[in-house]
Image: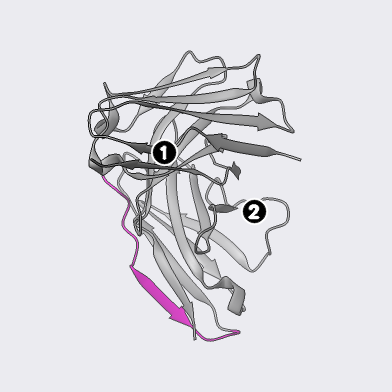
Amino acid sequence: EVQLVESGGGLVQPGGSLRLSCAASGFTFSSYWMSWVRQAPGKGLEWVANIKQDGSEKYYVDSVKGRFTISRDNAKNSLYLQMNSLRAEDTAVYYCARALRGDYWGQGTLVTVSS
Amino acid sequence: QSALTQPASVSGSPGQSITISCTGTSSDVGSYNLVSWYQQHPGKAPKLMIYEVSKRPSGVSNRFSGSKSGNTASLTISGLQAEDEADYYCCSYAGSKVFGGGTKLTVL
């Protein structure tokens, strides 16, 4: 059974940093693109970042470029999102999703940026 | 990276069919047959309903179908059921991704 479990969310002050993790199981993690997608409270889905199977290609939405870094550790079947210089508008539930088409999603982890 | 355009809401009665449109540009929806649709119930993670414009994942009802013409993709749900009431999002994906703003489906 495919499982994606996000962790690392929480309350952080503006300008702070947070590292999200996504633990994958039930499939060959190294064979898939992976994505982070977020959803602000009461709002729609917003793509954040993608990473290729071997980490050689990464793409980001403009609003997080230079602040967020997506990475992966195929030996640990894990996906990461390092978030720096956090802003109030980064407050959202962050989901990891498998494959560019997003065929499996985790349950999400809530990030709240507030003083 | 502008969001794709979806109607904010649609509604239909049980047994009817509805269609949700998703309009992009020649740089996203119009360029590739890489459009997906997601269903999201309140408090739940999104669920993939359609990918590559018209393909259904295993386990998704054949009441759900997708199509595309030019820069506009569409999701059609036939034989509406109460459990179809949810938010629906389209997405164009290649290297980067862009989502639509979402459509709230109400089953009357």
Q: Is residue B83 above or below residue A41?
A: below
Q: Residue at x 51, y 54 (%)?
A: B37
Q: Residue at x 30, y 48 (%)?
A: B3
- Is residue A110 covered in magenta? no
Q: Residue at x 52, y 50 (%)?
A: B53
Q: Chain of mark 1?
A: A
| Numbered circle sitting on residue B56 | 2
- The residue segment tinted magenta is B1-15
Q: Amino acid at mark 2?
A: Arg
Q: Is residue A55 above or below residue B89?
A: above
| Numbered circle sitting on residue A36 | none
- Is residue B6 covered in magenta? yes
Nearer to me, B45 or B76: B45
User: Left or right of B2: which side holds A76?
Assistant: right
Residue B25 in the image, given as x and y percentages of width and height: 30, 46
Tell me if mark 1 has few (under 14), some (14-19) or many (20+) residues whose alpha carbon lies within 10 angstroms of its own: few
Which residue in the protein does label 1 denote? A10
Residue A6 in the image, given as x and y percentages of width and height: 55, 36
Q: Is residue A4 above or below residue B62?
A: above
Q: Is residue B19 above or below residue B12?
A: above
Q: CA distance from mark 1 to mark 2?
A: 35 Å
Q: Amino acid at mark 1?
A: Gly
